[in-house]
């Protein structure tokens, strides 16, 4: 999962992009980057490992001038966590340039890369995203949008793209619509972002979603939209509403906070905890679901677990060692609220189980008499190939243990998951048109032929030269 943000036609576009990336930091914490294009069509890039706040000092921002900029925060699903895989990519092509920022995962990246390498392409990263850059460089369309449409023919999987070809900004979303992408107006300019919360921080007015299969081009002649990609069934990622997106965002045209409260209410109906004294969330992504559970069950909602906000998201840490270390310093229980109580702990999901088991131990250590775990999504039992870091089934605890084994392993008195139907019923505009492959094992497209190779290579890179 990554965050992308772009600006066209606004002074100091890079500074606005930096602000937008702050709002999308939750979507990726491994690296951040910005490409800016000035009035003379000169493109410059700045990329760094780590958080947005760590990568862009005064010197870097002073060099990123112009009315065009695109930015990226990275969480790797394909390609190693290394500076050569940081985005946006910037490629120099025949006295021109291509810049690209990608959110998603290409399911046929291995085949695309082999075809390009057989044709003489040289790759400078292990990201799937770089294959798209090579394909754009080889495209012969008469317009920038025609070149992008040609390059995306045969590209499979999830992608939201921000692209700069010289002084044209292009936006593309895959026909399935797996990942969110929105557009807004800022004065006479345009802003594009993964989530609406990033429009808010720069004062842009929300215009609409970028539609699945749509390609948008913006240049000095205005904004153009084409639907040049083959249509496909809509498969929006339900996990965006469960966990990834910020609650102050509207994703897939629906409020994330509202859907999470609905998830919590449905969870209380399906998996009640009679006799519990309090309900509390595993902050922060579960706050809204816990409020919904408390409201539906009539149980007191308390802030019984405090999160250290100087520690990032544990799920999107690239290694298990990093996840384990950060869990130990990320949360602290409020003993006065927990001691002697029967408590309901609401979390949005359980992926590997490491965080949950540690939290249960913390809560019991603070004196809780009973701990009832409630999860506002279904058990995650299958890998995701569309942009979430669950590539191996053996890493998913719910796929490896029975319900009773999970109860014992996590150390809880009871464990309740939301059903898939209940989860989908809480989504905006009803249950249809959502991908739930990680919960059901029912993939809407063909899965990668070589998933381990896909994991090893894919996603974003350094400046590259293409002959």
Image (cartoon, rainbow, N blue to C red):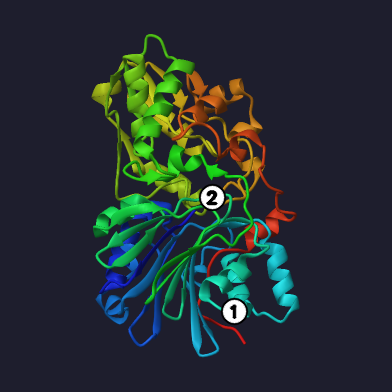
Percent across and percent down for residue 328 are 39, 42
Residue occupied by mark 2: 177
Relative to residue 383, is residue 397 depicted above or below?
Answer: above
Residue occupied by mark 1: 137
Q: Viewed as shown, does residue 21 lie left or right of 96? A: left
Q: Which of 101 and 52 is in front in this view?
A: 101
Query: Circle 2 sits in a helix, a strand or a loop, which is it?
Result: loop
* Residue 46 visible in rendering: yes
Relative to residue 249, is residue 187 depicted above or below?
Answer: below
Relative to residue 341, is residue 379 depicted above or below?
Answer: below
Q: Nearer the viewer, residue 455 or 243?
A: 243
* Residue 419 visible in rendering: no
**Pointer 1: residues within 10 angstroms few (<14), some, or many (20+)?**
many
Q: First in sequence: mark 1 or mark 2?
A: 1
Percent across and percent down for residue 141 are 60, 77
Q: Viewed as shown, does residue 65 lie left or right of 349? A: left
Q: Which of 97 and 27 is in front in this view?
A: 97
């Amino acid at each position: 999962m990554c965050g992308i943000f772009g600006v066209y036609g606004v002074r100091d576009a890079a500074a606005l992009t930096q602000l937008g990336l702050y709002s999308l930091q939750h979507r990726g914490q491994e690296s951040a980057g910005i490409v800016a294009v000035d009035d003379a069509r000169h493109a410059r890039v700045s990329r760094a490992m780590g958080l947005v706040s760590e990568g862009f000092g005064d010197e870097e921002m002073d060099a990123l001038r112009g009315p065009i900029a695109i930015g990226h925060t990275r969480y790797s699903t394909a390609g190693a966590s290394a500076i050569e895989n940081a985005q946006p990519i910037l490629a120099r092509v025949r006295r021109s340039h291509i810049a690209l920022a990608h959110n998603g995962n290409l399911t046929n990246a291995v085949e695309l890369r082999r075809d390009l390498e057989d044709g003489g392409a040289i790759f400078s990263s292990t990201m799937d995203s770089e294959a798209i850059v090579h394909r754009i460089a080889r495209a012969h369309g008469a317009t920038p949008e025609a070149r992008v449409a040609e390059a995306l023919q045969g590209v499979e999987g999830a992608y939201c793209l921000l692209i700069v070809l010289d002084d044209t900004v292009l936006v593309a979303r895959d026909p399935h619509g797996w990942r969110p992408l929105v557009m807004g107006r800022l004065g006479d300019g345009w802003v594009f972002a993964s989530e609406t919360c990033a429009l808010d921080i720069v004062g842009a007015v929300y215009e609409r979603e970028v539609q699945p299969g749509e390609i948008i081009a913006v240049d000095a002649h205005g904004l153009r939209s084409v639907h040049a990609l083959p249509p496909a069934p809509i498969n929006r990622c339900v996990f965006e509403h469960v966990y990834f997106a910020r609650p102050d965002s509207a994703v897939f045209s629906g409020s994330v906070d509202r859907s999470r409260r609905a998830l919590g209410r449905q969870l209380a109906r399906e998996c009640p905890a009679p006799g519990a004294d309090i309900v509390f969330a595993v902050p922060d992504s579960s706050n809204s679901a816990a409020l919904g559970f408390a409201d539906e069950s009539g149980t007191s909602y308390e802030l019984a677990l405090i999160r250290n906000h100087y520690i990032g998201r544990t799920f999107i840490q690239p290694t298990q060692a990093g996840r384990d270390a950060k869990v130990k310093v990320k949360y602290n229980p409020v003993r006065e609220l927990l001691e002697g109580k029967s408590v309901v702990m609401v979390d949005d999901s359980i992926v590997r189980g490491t965080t949950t088991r540690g939290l249960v131990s913390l809560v019991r250590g603070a004196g809780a008499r009973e701990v009832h775990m409630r999860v506002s999504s279904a058990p995650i039992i299958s890998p995701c190939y569309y942009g979430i870091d669950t590539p191996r089934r053996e890493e998913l605890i719910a796929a490896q243990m029975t319900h009773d084994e999970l109860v014992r392993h996590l150390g809880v008195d009871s464990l309740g998951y939301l059903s898939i139907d209940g989860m989908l019923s809480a989504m905006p505009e009803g249950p249809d048109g959502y991908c739930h492959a990680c919960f059901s094992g029912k993939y809407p497209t063909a899965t990668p032929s070589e998933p381990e190779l896909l994991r090893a290579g894919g996603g974003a890179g350094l400046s590259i030269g293409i002959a």
